Image (cartoon, helix red, strand yellow):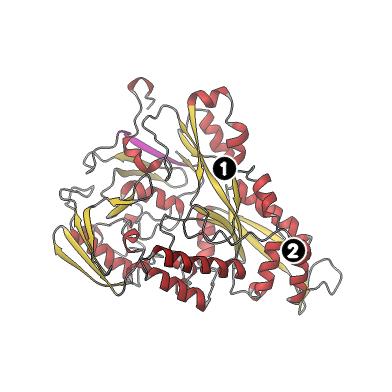
Amino acid sequence: MGSIGEPKRLLPLLASDSASATIAGFIFNGLLKYDKDGNLVGDLAESWEVSKNGKVITFHLRRGVKWQDGKVFTAWDVMFTFNRLRDPKVATPYSGDYLEVQKAEVLDKYTFRVYYKQPFAPALSSWTMGIIPKHLLEKEDLNTTRYNRRPVGTGPYKLVEWVTGQKLVLEANPDYFEGRPCIDRIIYRIIPDPSTMFMELKAGNLDYMGLTPFQYRRQTNDPFFEKYFRKFKYPSYGYTYMGYNLRLPIFRDRRVRQALTYAIDRKMIVDVVLLGLGQVSTGPFPPSLWACNPHVKPYPYDPARARRLLAQAGWRDTDGDGILDKNGRPFVFTVTTNQGNLQRAAVAEIIQYELAQMGVKVKIRILEWQAMLHAIMEGNFQAVILGWALGYEPDPYDIWHSSKTGPGEFNFIGYKNPEVDRILKEARATFDKEERKRLYYRFHEIIARDQPYTFLYVPDSLSLLSARFKNVKPAKTGIWYNYIHWYVPKNRQKY
């Protein structure tokens, strides 16, 4: 399989980028996981009970599960993972969910119980987090340990090789508790340029890759691809955005951020860059999530309104050079995005052109994936074009709550709104789906008003897989939910 990004750290607690999370997903298991319909089912936990008041969960763990070094998995590993998720010295962006727990205890070798301070709606979904081995990591600094590059999990695949900048090689775990995967080996190749990756696919050197809209619509419809590959398209649980560093004076005025959104023709971006394979985003939830407020409409493309808002905020071209200025400072900023994502690079150029018509000068900076993530987490950016891949549990606390603005956390733009903080806490504390929906609808309205991001689009998820692979069954959650049961008939095997 091909990817434009290289993983950074493979322990699940630290795997905050998509490349790291993909590889960690092959190696580690959570207590629970999502099935093909997006429902929570057991993984390392065989069963569980939630108390009537919603504040106590008891997990009954599978017996006979082994770590990839042969040691037995127990509830003490779950307790160790839980404690590390709450440890302020561990640079995890996921701590918020576990700080809601009042107490955790190991009842016996295979029973783990958590007591929440108050009812916590995302509680069960938080236990999809990969569990890590106590016996290997209890004396290690998780931020720097060698096990970030040599992980040992309970999962279906073991990492056997990592050649920096080139590939990671995973081999089937013969002792996996659900049975040995049918596919012997996964080679994850790092190819930063999608065009080169596509050439590798055509040459028979890749079996799977995500497609650009152009590749999906225009380059994969001939008899060759119809014979040798299967194409997949389904709605994504995510969105692409341009986020503003709200710590900078230039972006603090809400009218300025609204103006920038009015000045960008996002429908044209969907039609031209995505070739119609997506839709304009309205805010922090994609339409595929039940929390998405259908009454919030996209900001229309309205350059005249954008100019009025910028003028109201004090931005005028006082020296006649074609660039707006305020208090002697020109309206100039740099937008950063990642190398290898042709859509984002094209979007950056469209934004640069359209904002120039407003008198706003935009510079573009393209960085290698990990270099970009480092810059963002250090706060070394002005604006960034990125995407969020969200889960089936809509809780957006880690991205938007004001307590999550520290180094390495997901609210890296520094958004702070007391009403949003209150809503996010309240929504987490209710199990009533209709009440949560009401709260999230209001949250959606506020974020759409504040425009801390210009919400660009919700792309369709597009991919291609060799037709040799059998038992691939597309579902609501995509195709990967049952990958351990994929196989290739003997007469089609290549490697």
Q: Secondary structure at mark 1?
A: loop
Which residue in the rendered view is the most extreme toward the right? 320
User: To which quarter of the image does residue 299 belong?
Assistant: bottom right
Residue carrying label 2: 361
Residue at image position (34%, 40%) is 482
Considering the image in quadrants, where does the N terminus appear?
top left
In the current view of this chain or complex, which residue is farthest to the top? Answer: 491
Which residue was labeled with disc 1? 193
Residue at 29%, 43% (x, y): give it: 156
> Which one is nearer the viewer's eye here, 283 or 1?
283
**For the image shown, how many numbered marks are present on the structure?**
2
N-term mark: 1 or 2:
1
Using residue 143 as the reference point, say whether residue 61 is left or right of it. Answer: left
Q: Which of the 4 image quarters holds residue 259?
A: bottom right
Asked whether the viewer can see residue 91, the reply is: yes
State the extent of the magenta-drawn residues as a range. Answer: 182-193
The structure residue drawn at horizontal position 45% and vertical position 52%, both measured from the top left corner, is 18
**Helix, strand, or loop for circle 2?**
strand
The stretch drawn in magenta includes residue 184: yes
Asked if residue 193 lies left or right of residue 429, the reply is right
Q: Amino acid at mark 1?
A: Asp
Q: Position of residue 267 (x, y in %)?
A: 67, 51
Q: Is residue 310 above or below residue 6?
A: below
Gap between marks 1 and 2 measured at Cα = 28 Å
Q: Amino acid at mark 2?
A: Lys
In the rendered image, residue 214 lying in the magenta stretch gets the answer no
